[in-house]
Image: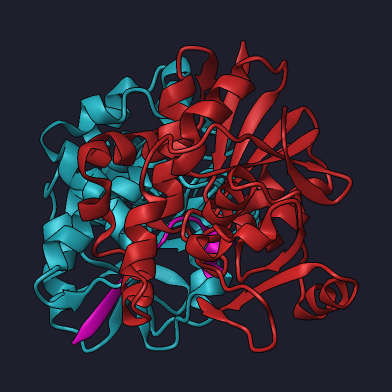
Chain colours: A red, B cyan
Amino acid sequence: MKQLDVCLTPDLLHLHKMDNCIVVVADVFRATSCMVTGLAYGVKSITPVATIEECKFLQDKGFFAAAERDARKVEGFDLDNSPFSFMDEKLIGAEVAMTTTNGTLSIAKAKASAVKVMVGSFLNLGALAQHLRSEPYDVLVLCAGWKGRPNLEDTLYAGALAEALKDQYMLLEDGTLMAQRLYNQSRDNLLGSVSNSSHVRRLQRLGIQKDISYCLQTDLYDVVPVLRGGALVAMN
Amino acid sequence: MKQLDVCLTPDLLHLHKMDNCIVVVADVFRATSCMVTGLAYGVKSITPVATIEECKFLQDKGFFAAAERDARKVEGFDLDNSPFSFMDEKLIGAEVAMTTTNGTLSIAKAKASAVKVMVGSFLNLGALAQHLRSEPYDVLVLCAGWKGRPNLEDTLYAGALAEALKDQYMLLEDGTLMAQRLYNQSRDNLLGSVSNSSHVRRLQRLGIQKDISYCLQTDLYDVVPVLRGGALVAMN
């Protein structure tokens, strides 16, 4: 039987074997919710990069570029880290480059050893779960967290994916068990359950309540993003 | 207002500032439950050491020595890592040296920067909480985890301590929030709630069910262990 494991933050990734794994990166507020939204709206590809400089370099080559640090848009870039900026007609068929505080870093770490890197959010929860069931590989859910620390929203997503896959996968580790319990405890009121989390407080100070409600919606899209040759594309 | 934070595993300790903190180390199964039990039964001091060699060295100097690796007693030592071996008349007034897979390592990491290092378990939950309230310092609960990974039982303990102190301390971080929710979800049935955790499965294979039930009892002792000059002693 396949196994599903959860890594609560990229700072614990050294403890996880990835060589038979599909790594599902989750940065629910907001990087991976943006990626899922963009690909669902017709963006051709999203290239996650680790630094502002790489992002600028791709922007100069004609990419639309999205750069966020500490939950704010970096000056000089086209898009910020709100999923609503990815619902733009001009992005249909376009190539996007993206760097964020936590999410793109996690993708960079994962691609070094994983069989495949995919991207998850509540928005594509069911579609991704259905795809994973068809794969022969173990799953590692990598929560992007906040600057190395675990966070509530990504842990809840990991729990949601574990819950969706529990009949097909062995869930062996305590990190997984804790994520699953936290999700089951609050699945009927995700918005209420994250309202006193550190990141929501951070985002609320920036007036991004609309993004938060949006990112907690389940199964809005069928898109399954996979990393191919350094860029995320929608699987057919 | 003082702050209480939770570090879910020593592998994340680099993300936490400890310079105004009392660090409470928790390795509920079983190192810190042994320490609390030993000091409650009259052991004079318990010196936590990181290696088997250091433990042997102190044994040769006349200490009673307890060494555990991978949940098993190491050959040639006096005590194993069961709290019941610390309820021994010959240990009254004695000096004990102790090394374990996770707990003593966490103590070694904490003592580098913390104001004070204390040791917590369900067995002395209320007494430690009461003592902490009288201190001017912030609190960091350091869960020993299992070989770098978070585990359920230490997270539950961190949640229990956070819950006990929530009126006197600010609980700001998601790790704390998650621990607190997990504890509140299962506080009326801790034994049932840990029954499918990885460590309990590991210990059950070793036939240590009695230890597990014992370690989940709340407020059996009033002892408050503090690290002084490299050894844990009971505070008066």
Q: Is B182 on the left-hand or right-hand side of A30?
A: left
The residue located at (20%, 54%) in the rendering is: A192
B180 is higher (above) or lower (below) than A203? above
Does the magenta run of residues contain B9?
A: yes
The residue located at (43%, 34%) in the rendering is: A219
**Does residue A19 appear anywhere in the picture?**
yes
- The stretch of residues the image draws in magenta is B1-13
Residue A8, position as x, y percentages in the image: 52, 50
Residue B133, position as x, y percentages in the image: 14, 78
Does the magenta run of residues contain A5?
A: no
Front-most of residues B141 and B121: B141
Q: Is A151 on the left-hand or right-hand side of B38?
A: right
Residue A17, position as x, y percentages in the image: 73, 37
Residue B45, position as x, y percentages in the image: 36, 64
A152 is higher (above) or lower (below) than A118? below
Q: Quadrant of the C terminus of chain A?
A: top right
**Does residue B141 appear anywhere in the picture?**
no
Q: Quadrant of the N terminus of chain A?
A: top right
The residue located at (15%, 68%) in the rendering is: B165
The mark total stands at: 0
Q: Is B198 on the left-hand or right-hand side of B36?
A: right
Front-most of residues A231 and B148: A231
A120 is higher (above) or lower (below) than B135? above
Front-most of residues B107 and B64: B107
The residue located at (46%, 35%) in the rendering is: A176
Front-most of residues B208 and A36: A36
B205 is higher (above) or lower (below) than B186? above
Q: Is A38 on the left-hand or right-hand side of B84?
A: right
Q: Quadrant of residue B166?
A: bottom left
Residue placed furthest toward the front: A89
Q: Quadrant of residue B227?
A: bottom left
